[in-house]
Image (cartoon, grey):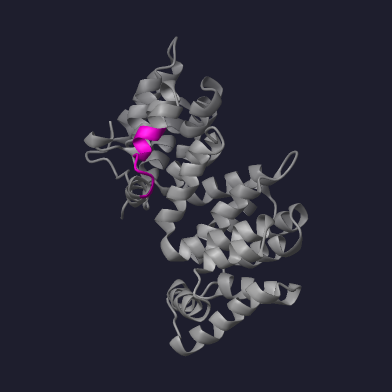
Amino acid sequence: VQGTIFPAPNFNPVMDAQMLGGALQGFECDKDMLIDILTQRSNAQRQMIAEAYQSMYGRNLVGDLKEQLSSHFKDVMVGLMYPPPLYDAHELWHAMKGAGTDENCLIEILASRTSGEIFQLREAYCLQYSSNLQEDIYSETSGHFRDTLMNLVQGTREEGYENPAMAAQDAMVLWEACQQRTGEHKTLLQMILCNKSYPQLWLVFQEFQTISGQDLVDAINDCYDGYFQELIVAIVRCVQDKASYFAYKLYNAIHDFGFHNKTVIRILIARSEIDLLTIRKRYKERYGKSLFHDIRNFASGHYKKALLALCAGDMEDY
């Protein structure tokens, strides 16, 4: 595991719940205490703290956090309390409800999750919102972008399987799809990218490079546009190096959008126990500055403290 958050040793959920109760019920909310506890426990430990809190105070910890906190700091603290599949479901739900659709959120989550993770988030979505994720995506999106999302959300990607003989054939299909650009070719393109295993796609991408003399991402960027193009590029980037994909998303969210808070919060929380350490490394290699440094320069107050605690920077990052 290449995360930045690990289970705390000598963990005592009752004591943590008591401390959080004191921090939340006091005259002034002790935000530093919230950060110290919630960013230094694994998600499984946080669930145990929430249970202890409920039995101790007869109150819901998430409800109390929502009531006492505000703005982006609240988003971080509340986000940390969701089990991972429910956090993904929560983000997808909010990306589609209300005015407009946050296509970037749909792309980032569905292009990067494994079949197992997609199955779990679909279940969580259904349980939490009494709604069907496939149906919601279908009604909120359109065209080949929708078709590709629908394919991804089925979670039917093969796991680990590879067939070198098929790779050249698939690469030819991708190459033709970049030349012809018909609806039929777009469908073939998304079928390969959404259903073949990562090891198989690795082989396909190498074959594609040999056939075309071009990296697949460059070829797609030359041939397609809009959300369909962004989605298939995201899938390709995740196959090539998922940590680099998230580093790229973070960099854009911090620099291109004048700090797109939602994206920064979502990636740091979602990847904190999976590969945030690797993402941090890729970020530094690719952009020269550390993720820690950039967050420090763009965020402020307790919100900044919480993000930096999740990022868990090294000494040289200060």
Q: Within the image, what quadrant is residue 23 found in? A: top left
Quadrant in which residue 100 is drawn: top right
When the figure is inspected, residue 157 is found, relative to residue 303, above or below; the finding is below
Vertical comparison of 16 with 230: above or below? above
Q: Residue furthest top?
A: 27
Q: Which quadrant is the N terminus positioned in?
A: bottom left
| Count of picture labels | 0
Q: Nearer the viewer, residue 31 or 13?
A: 31
Membership of 143 in magenta stretch:
no
Q: Quadrant of the C terminus?
A: top left
* Segment colored magenta: 286-294
Residue at 55% in and 82% down:
170
Q: Nearer the viewer, residue 148 or 135?
A: 148
Residue 67 in the image: above or below residue 180: above
Which residue lies at the image location 48% right of the left edge and 27% below the top edge?
Answer: 73
Task: Please provide percent x and percent y for residue 138.
Answer: 74, 58
Instruction: Judge whether residue 180 can be spotted in this image.
Output: yes
Q: Is residue 288 magenta?
A: yes
- Residue 201, position as x, y percentages in the image: 48, 74
Who's the residue at 35% across and 46% down the image?
Answer: 280
Q: Position of residue 77 (x, y in %)?
A: 46, 32
Left or right position of 146 against 118 = right
